[in-house]
Image (cartoon, rainbow, N blue to C red):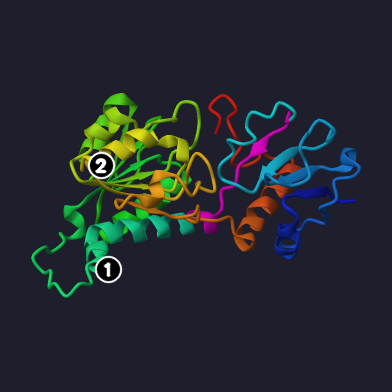
């Protein structure tokens, strides 16, 4: 008998995911039992997990080999002490490409000055400012994990000068990489457009505080599809008000949905998008889940295991 797998996610996700998961398991040569019914927790070998599903406590799942998250971010679950097996975050080609495309679109929007033409439909012929070419524009990326690397590669392929920062040293072809406090200062100081793709951990909270914002070139643009707590909201609003930051496109927030009374909604120099920068797509993410189950059944190391000490 093959592995028994529990799909624990909000009910509406079950009919969307079930056929893709079954197809991916079959392609991986796995004969599985897949259900969204959590009764009899002692019988399951794996839990495929997304917040909002029926599982609140993993302690009854005494025989599971791993918890496989459907989300790239694991801050809502990483501190759960009832998980005593490997916790694997989602790394998926669809999610990764979706993020790179979304960021690239907004970088190009800023680079080309598109907002000025869309908002300036008032009969005035504005042709005095011609945007530079991509090699003349520096884009900074904070966070060089899977999403950051893919985004940097896409921007580099267009011709942008990309500088990147990560918590630990990394070497990436065609990209200037930095780490540490001094490296962060270098990247911030060079970034005409800054992209935040760090995880949400105690060490990354308020990475973009008043001091960091002051290091940016005046008029810099900020794009945050990473995590809301990366930004000190009050400090960003002040920097927008005094013109040091020219505009911010924010896809993630400390509270979601973003409350209607939040000042970001009404600020003329803020674009709010509703956490849509990228999504976990069942068509491709199911293959990542199936591969980890295959590895578990073969006695191999799981992929993308969360480091609990680093919260990511």
Q: Residue at x 56, y 48 (%)?
A: 91
Outermost residue toward the front? 261
Pick the residue in front: 110 or 305.
110
Q: Is residue 28 visible?
A: no
Q: Quadrant of residue 25?
A: bottom right
Q: Secondary structure at mark 2?
A: helix
Residue 185, numbered label: none
In the rendered structure, does residue 92 fall within the stretch colored magenta?
A: yes
Q: Measured from the top left, where is residue 154 in percent x and y?
A: 36, 57
Residue 22 located left or right of residue 195: right
In this rendering, the count of numbered labels is 2
Give the class, few, some or many, for how many residues have Cα within 10 Å of label 1's Cα (few <14, many ≥20): few
Labels 2 & 1 near each other (Cβ < 8 A): no
Q: Residue at x 81, y 52 (%)?
A: 36
Q: Is residue 270 visible?
A: yes
What segment carries the magenta color?
83-96
Q: Residue at x 45, y 48 (%)?
A: 147
Q: Measured from the top left, where is residue 295 in percent x and y?
A: 70, 45
Q: Which residue is mark 1?
A: 118
Q: Which residue is mark 2?
A: 241
Q: Measured from the top left, where is residue 89 in percent x and y?
A: 60, 42
Outermost residue toward the left? 128
**Quadrant the C terminus occupies:** top right
| In the image, residue 127 above or below residue 183 | below
| In the image, residue 32 above or below residue 176 | below
């Amino acid at each position: 008998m093959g592995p028994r797998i529990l799909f624990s996610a909000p009910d509406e996700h079950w009919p969307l995911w079930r056929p893709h998961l079954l197809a991916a398991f079959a392609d991986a040569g796995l004969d599985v039992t897949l259900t969204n019914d959590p009764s009899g927790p002692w019988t399951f070998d794996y839990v495929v997990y997304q917040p909002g599903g029926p599982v609140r406590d993993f302690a009854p799942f005494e025989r599971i080999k791993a918890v496989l998250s459907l989300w790239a971010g694991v801050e809502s679950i990483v501190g759960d002490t009832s998980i005593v097996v490997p916790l694997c975050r989602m790394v998926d080609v669809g999610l990764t490409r979706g993020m790179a495309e979304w960021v690239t679109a907004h970088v190009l929007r800023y680079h080309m000055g598109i907002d000025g033409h869309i908002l300036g439909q008032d009969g005035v012929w504005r042709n005095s400012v011609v945007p530079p070419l991509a090699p003349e524009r520096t884009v900074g990326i904070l966070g060089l994990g899977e999403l950051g690397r893919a985004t940097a590669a896409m921007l580099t392929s267009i011709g942008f000068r990309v500088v990147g920062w990560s918590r630990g040293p990394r070497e990436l072809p065609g990209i200037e990489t930095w780490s540490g406090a001094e490296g962060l200062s270098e990247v911030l100081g060079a970034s005409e457009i800054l992209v935040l793709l760090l995880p949400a951990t105690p060490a990354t909270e308020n990475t973009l505080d008043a001091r960091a914002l002051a290091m940016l070139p005046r008029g810099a643009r900020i794009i945050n599809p990473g995590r809301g707590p990366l930004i000190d909201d009050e400090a960003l609003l002040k920097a927008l008000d005094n013109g040091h930051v020219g505009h911010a496109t924010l896809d993630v927030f400390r509270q979601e949905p973003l409350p209607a009374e939040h000042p970001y909604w009404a600020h003329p120099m803020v674009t709010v998008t509703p956490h849509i920068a990228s999504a976990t797509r069942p068509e491709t993410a199911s293959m990542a889940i199936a591969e980890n189950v295959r590895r578990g059944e073969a006695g191999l190391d799981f992929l993308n295991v969360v480091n609990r000490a680093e919260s990511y």
